[in-house]
Amino acid sequence: SEENEYVNIIASPPTDYVLRFVIRPLGIITGSWAWGSIIHFTTGGSCCGYGQRVPAIWFHPGTTKLEINIDDSLNGQRQCAVPYELTLNKKHAIEVRVYGTKSSVYVNGELASQKTIGTR
């Protein structure tokens, strides 16, 4: 098991939810396909079917920009990205809100990204 890895099963996950966590980026992963995986909730599989990214959160390759995938019944890879980089070696409070047909991402209490999504 890797450091900071946590694996568990949520038997009946809700379709509306709020996910909060604190992250402190320590470095940048390089390479064109070097996505830095942070969290990936799935019903099984990696991409891009319904339930495979509910949500999935990564650092975009070569940056500390967050990319959040929140799938719905029409798109298994609905992206809601933070348009700026997180500061290295600083703690950032992240909140992902998914209610109805709207997904929102907050960084340190400020709205960073919002997207309309389909039903789940």
Image (spheres, rainbow, N blue to C red):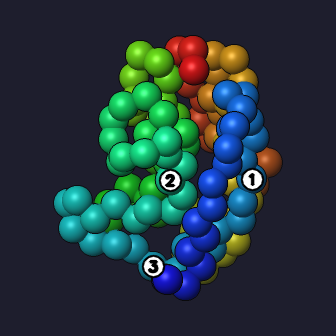
Give residue 63's quadrant in the image. Answer: bottom left
**Residue under numbered circle 3:** 27
In the image, which disc is placed on residue 55? none
Q: Secondary structure at mark 1?
A: strand
Q: Secondary structure at mark 2?
A: strand
Relative to 107, 70 lies left or right: left
**Residue 18 shows in the view:** yes
* Percent of width and height locating residue 110: 75, 44
Q: Nearer the viewer, mark 3 or mark 1?
A: 1
> Against 100, is 60 above or below?
below
Q: Residue at x 34, y 72 (%)?
A: 29
**Residue under numbered circle 2:** 40
Cβ atoms at labels 1 and 2 below 8 Å apart: no
Q: Residue at x 58, y 66 (%)?
A: 7
Q: Which of the two discs, 3 and 1, labels the residue nearer the N terminus?
A: 1
Q: Secondary structure at mark 3?
A: loop
Q: Which of the two discs, 3 and 2, labels the residue nearer the N terminus?
A: 3
**Residue under numbered circle 1:** 20
